[in-house]
Image (cartoon, grey):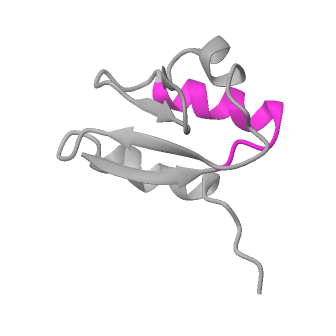
């Protein structure tokens, strides 16, 4: 399983992310300290605290193409 942090800081980012996740058949989950939700559910994603990064879980081999598309949602590091 592949995990990484992403930041969905706007309504547009959430819509784009959920559209992306729905184009794949394997399960994709978002987790926080307390919750684990289906990343394909726009209502589920909006139920999370999106003011901070969330962790995404993707099955290993199946998700390589999907993982490459996550760069656009990675939190920006400050220097």
Quarter location, residue 58 = top left
Q: Is residue 21 left or right of residue 50?
A: left
Q: Residue at x 43, y 24 (%)?
A: 23
Residue 64 to residue 11: above or below: below
Q: Position of residue 37 (x, y in %)?
A: 49, 21
Q: Is 53 on the left-hand or right-hand side of 67?
A: right
Q: In this picture, is 18 found above or below 75?
A: above
Residue 20 magenta = yes
x 60%, y 58%: residue: 74
Residue extent of the magenta highlight = 7-21
Q: Nearer the viewer, residue 2 or 11?
A: 2
Compared with 27, 62 (above or below) is below
Point out the image quarter for the C terminus: bottom right
Which of 66/2 is in front? 2
In this picture, residue 69 sits left or right of residue 15: left
Residue sitting nearer the eye, 4 or 34: 34
Which residue ends up furthest to the bottom in the rendered image? 79
Q: Position of residue 38 (x, y in %)?
A: 46, 20
Residue for point 67% across, 61% down: 75
Q: Residue furthest left?
A: 61
Q: Residue at x 55, y 39 (%)?
A: 33
- Residue 2: give x, y in percent of width and height: 30, 50
How many discs appear? 0
Placement of the N terminus among the 4 image quadrants: top left
Tell me if residue 48 comes above or below residue 73 in the rendering: above
Residue 18 falls within the magenta-colored stretch: yes
| Magenta portion: prevailing SS class | helix
Query: Where residue 77 sits: x, y (%)?
Result: 70, 74
């Amino acid at each position: 399983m592949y995990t990484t942090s992403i930041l969905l800081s706007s309504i547009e980012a959430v819509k784009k992310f959920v559209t992306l996740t729905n184009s794949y058949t394997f399960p994709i989950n978002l987790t926080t300290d307390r919750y684990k939700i289906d990343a394909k559910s726009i209502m589920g994603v909006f139920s999370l605290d999106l003011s901070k990064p969330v962790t995404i879980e993707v099955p290993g081999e199946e998700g390589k193409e999907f993982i490459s598309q996550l760069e656009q949602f990675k939190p920006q590091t400050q220097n």
